[in-house]
Image (cartoon, rainbow, N blue to C red):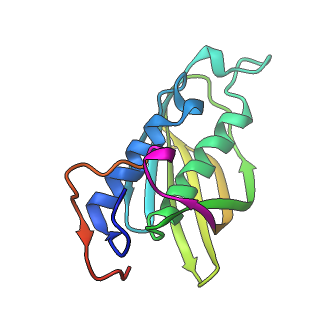
Amino acid sequence: MPAKGIVMRGEGHFRALERMYDSAPCNAGLRPRLRVERGKAEVRMEATPAMHHAAHAVHGAFYFKMLDDAAFFAANSLVTDVFVLTVSFNTELMRPVQDGELIARGRVVHAGRKLIFAESVLSDGKGRLLAKGSGVFARSSVVLDEHVGYVIEGGEGAALDGKE
């Protein structure tokens, strides 16, 4: 955990968010891959038959998870001291998919003092739009530290000025 007054910036913060995502129990069976940049995030995952509903296409719950994750981590890329929470999230499902790579890309559209607004799109490996989402995120009281899987390797990206 960074010492009090040390704020993670840039690449160190982004990689720590990625490690936190990888350590989340809900991702163990799905094995998604996350990449975070400032105000942006991308989640990739392979669609499998285990994700199908009775009509043999990927269930919308997986669309939602990927859209929310991409928007969430785009938002948390701007918040370096605490976990953000999803306040609300809207999803529009446009096209079914059975297999192949799924790619969700999220980006922050507005960051205020209390709320962060982000949107995301889900596409298949051929670039076809599958779904869109938009969410509102807020700072929580959950500190970003090793207890939530936020691990800083070698102190990379630390700043001693205490400013974001």
Q: Nearer the viewer, residue 74 or 82?
A: 82
Decide if residue 67 is in sight here: yes
- Name which residue lies at 57% across and 57% down: 72
- Name which residue lies at 66% across and 56% down: 133
**The C terminus appears in which quarter of the rendering?**
bottom left
Q: Nearer the viewer, residue 45 or 126?
A: 45
Rendered position, 117 above or below 61 = below
**The N terminus appears in which quarter of the rendering?**
bottom left
Name the quadrant containing residue 20. top left
Q: Is residue 98 left or right of residue 127?
A: right
- Name which residue lies at 34% across and 62% down: 2
Rendered position, 25 above or below 153 = above
Q: Nearer the viewer, residue 82 or 18?
A: 82
Q: Is residue 149 left or right of residue 6?
A: right
Question: What residue occupies the far right of the structure in this picture?
Answer: 54
Rendered position, 150 above or below 135 = above
Total numbered labels placed on residues in the image: 0
Rendered position, 112 above or below 42 = below
Spot occupied by residue 131 in the image (x, y as percentages of width and height):
65, 48
Spot occupied by residue 143 in the image (x, y as percentages of width and height):
52, 60
- Name which residue lies at 57% across and 47% down: 122
Spot occupied by residue 146 in the image (x, y as percentages of width and height):
43, 47
Decide if residue 125 is in sight here: no
Q: Which residues are magenta?
A: 140-149
Question: What residue occupies the far front of the structure in this picture?
Answer: 4
State yes or no: residue 43 in magenta. no
Spot occupied by residue 124 in the image (x, y as percentages of width and height):
51, 37
